[in-house]
Image: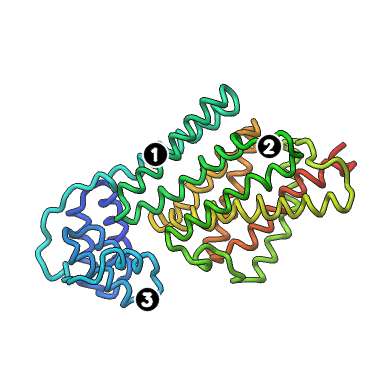
Amino acid sequence: MKAERQILRAQAALQAGDVARARQLLEEVLRSEPDSELGWFWLAHAVDTVEERRFCLSRVLEINRRNALARRELEALGPEPHRSPVETVARPARRQPLMEDMRLLALGYLLLLIGAEILTTLIEPRLGLLLHSLLLTGTLAYSARYWDRPVHRFWVALSLAPLIRLLSLSLPLRAFPLIYWYLIISVPLFVAVLVIQRTLKISWEEAGLHLGGLPWQLLIIVVGPFLGIVEYFILRPTPLISGLSAGEILISSLILLVSTGLLEEWIFRGIMQRVTEEIWGDRGVVYVAAVFAVLHIGHRSLVDVLFVFGVALFFGWFVRRTRSIVGVSLTHGLINIWLFLVAPFLPVIGG
């Protein structure tokens, strides 16, 4: 427990820019627990030289060869000489603005995303699109600037949120039925997710696209219709189909399952939450849930934003423990099927 507290204090010191203090704390941990995977991993981000960083990452992989993030960082550094930082006297390290400003920048991103959604929904869509464009450019530029640090993965993943809004508002969709808007918008988004997953070297298993914990994946699906009905009472949306014909229901349900359920869970829980957890652990679930909820401001209901935030927290918690997005993807799709296709036509609900 003492080592865990020391590592948490070291992480806080890194985020505050006090790299020398972080290094001191981590070296103390490793002298008492030389096989601490987290100790070596975080020390890799507090040392002064590339050689020391290589050594730290090599030790992480000796302890846990499945640590994909350490492996990617070590591969980026190359197979050059390395030496142990624990055997040397800790030197005052350079102040690292990246870690110091991380929380502030992440909060700023979230506030700007809220502003962009409010502009788009309530004031002037073109101003909202402009701000979303700036957010997209800024996240990609910032990730490129710090590509040699793990934090670049966080900013690459965050670029997907403004991209979703830019595509949904800029594609020429007026000639198509509303249900097909979801399908058309999803095509370039699927391409973007594939590119980002490949760029960040996230495996299919790491993205949660597997059937681990299958009984739990099946069990969570049961809550989908219930949550869909609850959200229907909040929003009372216009149905996306003209009637309950079998063909129309089948096609529309498949579109919502794939283009909203699978795609959005892949983006937010499979990619964004995955890389955010690498930096913030459990707090990453809360942050990604907030980003997801903000993108629902367009429904013009504060109650719905809060409802979506709660559902996103539940989904994030579930994925963090099962490491699979299959169950939440199906549940997400069912929520939208009941919200937009089924509930509006039930006499006791839709009126």
| Residue found at x 63% / y 42% | 307
Q: Quadrant of the N terminus?
A: bottom left
**Whether label 2 touches label 3, CB < 8 Å:** no
**Residue pointed to by mark 3:** 65
Outermost residue, top direction? 123
Dot 2: what SS? loop
* Percent position of residue 244, x then y: 88, 47
- Quadrant housing residue 279: bottom left
Q: How is the image coloured?
A: rainbow
Q: Nearer the viewer, mark 2 or mark 3?
A: 2
Q: Of the residues shown, which amino acid type is indicated by label 2?
A: Leu
Query: Quick one: 31 or 341, which is closer to the camera?
Result: 341
Q: Secondary structure at mark 1?
A: helix
Disc 2 to disc 3, C-alpha distance: 48 Å
- Asked whether residue 69 appears in the rendered view, the answer is yes
Q: Position of residue 282 (x, y in %)?
A: 45, 56
Q: Which label was assigned to residue 173?
A: 2
Q: Is residue 221 left or right of residue 104?
A: right
Res 349 visible: no
* SS at mark 3 in the image: loop
Mark 1 and mark 3 lie on one chain; the one further toward the N terminus is: 3
Asked if residue 311 is positioned above or below residue 321 in the image, the reply reads above
The numbered disc on residue 11 is none
Q: Reading the chain from its start, which is encountered first: label 2 or label 1?
A: 1
Q: CA distance from mark 2 to mark 1?
A: 27 Å
Query: Which residue occupies 71% across, 60% down?
Result: 221
Q: Is residue 143 above or below residue 111?
A: below
Residue designated by label 1: 138
